[in-house]
Amino acid sequence: MLFVCPAACLLAQTPPKPAQPSAAPQSTVTLSAENPKPLPAVPPDQVIITVGDQKITAAQFDQIISSLPAQFQANARGPARKQFADNVVHVLVLSQEGKKRKLDESPAFQIQSMFQNANILAGMTYEQLGKDAKLDDAELQKYYEAHKSEFERVHARHILIRTGGSPMAVRPGQKDLTEAEALAKAQEIRKKIEAGEDFAALARAESDDTGSGSNGGDLGFFGHNQMVPPFEEAAFKMKAGELSEPVKTPFGYHLIKVEEREAKTFEELKPELEKRLRPEQAQKIMQDLQNKATVKLDPAFFGAEATPPAVPPAPPTPPAAPAPQPTAK
């Protein structure tokens, strides 16, 4: 049996997207692992659910799904669409019964309905503020210069010499080295590389990271916060072609060779920079709107130090339709 989420649960949902206009062409749903079969292509204004006198078109049904958290949407449009439709029917049936009982005239319904409607509109407005925010190149360039290192990537190889207690398993036929033994072995291999032996060949023969070792120790490109901190710190300090001293991590000792470094240009990153800054701009506009609004908090209720509330760090989110629930066995 489905029970509608209380307001506290629903307030955690994401704002709905606008429905497709009724004159839009027929559409299909992109296939994916979560959605193996496409929805039937029907006109957006075709009625697909009727409950009493209330009718829901295909476009409206899709809008209801769009109000769900992202992780539920593909399932509701695909294999669980009938189950989700049943959930919608349950809500409408209970809603219509509530109207017959005149619960929609109760003070509790009136205040909750007022706040939930305001919450939906607030979420949609916040999203629109971000879309409408004006971002000039000078502001984007300033942000780019301040955060340039975050967009750097390094292409590196490594050879891992495992130490006792490492989460990496001991290779078959190899002994569990002490820390001193592992460091000595790493230093010995480093001398061989400096003497001209091939790094990739030594990685295949000696690295305890068998995954990358079989590929000559190649880790491909990686950015910040993708490797354990000591490894990342060492790799990003190195120049292309440089070989590191043994670097200690919880896995053991690493020899790192940086193949190349990559830093995207401002023009390449401009769309991503705009995406990052739009929520920040929306937050500033929201703060300005609140500063201009007439806001009063009753000091007798909230305390003598009561002041207008600060703008929250995250946008308000509106209530949404119930997510598909697992069917009871």
Image: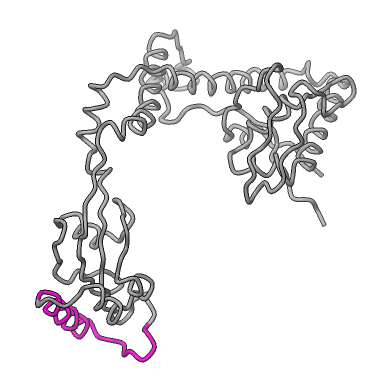
**Which quadrant of the view contains residue 120?**
top right
Percent x, y of residue 211: 38, 72
Identify the residue at image location x=15%, y=57%.
Answer: 238
Image vertical order of residue 53 relative to residue 241, above or below: above
Pick whichever, 190 or 196, lies toward us: 196
> Position of 16 compared to 148: left or right?
right
Identify the residue at image location x=63%, y=35%.
Answer: 68
120 part of magenta stretch: no
Location of the C terminus by quadrant is: bottom right
Residues in magenta, as a range: 170-194
187 part of magenta stretch: yes
> Position of 200 compared to 62: left or right?
left
Q: Main secondary structure of the magenta part?
A: helix
> Position of 224 compared to 294: left or right?
left
**Which quadrant of the view contains residue 179?**
bottom left
**Which quadrant of the view contains residue 252?**
bottom left
Percent x, y of residue 313: 41, 30
Identify the residue at image location x=80%, y=41%.
Answer: 82
Percent x, y of residue 107: 72, 18
Percent x, y of residue 70: 58, 39
Number of numbered discs: 0
Location of the N terminus by quadrant is: top right
Image vertical order of residue 311 relative to residue 69, above or below: above
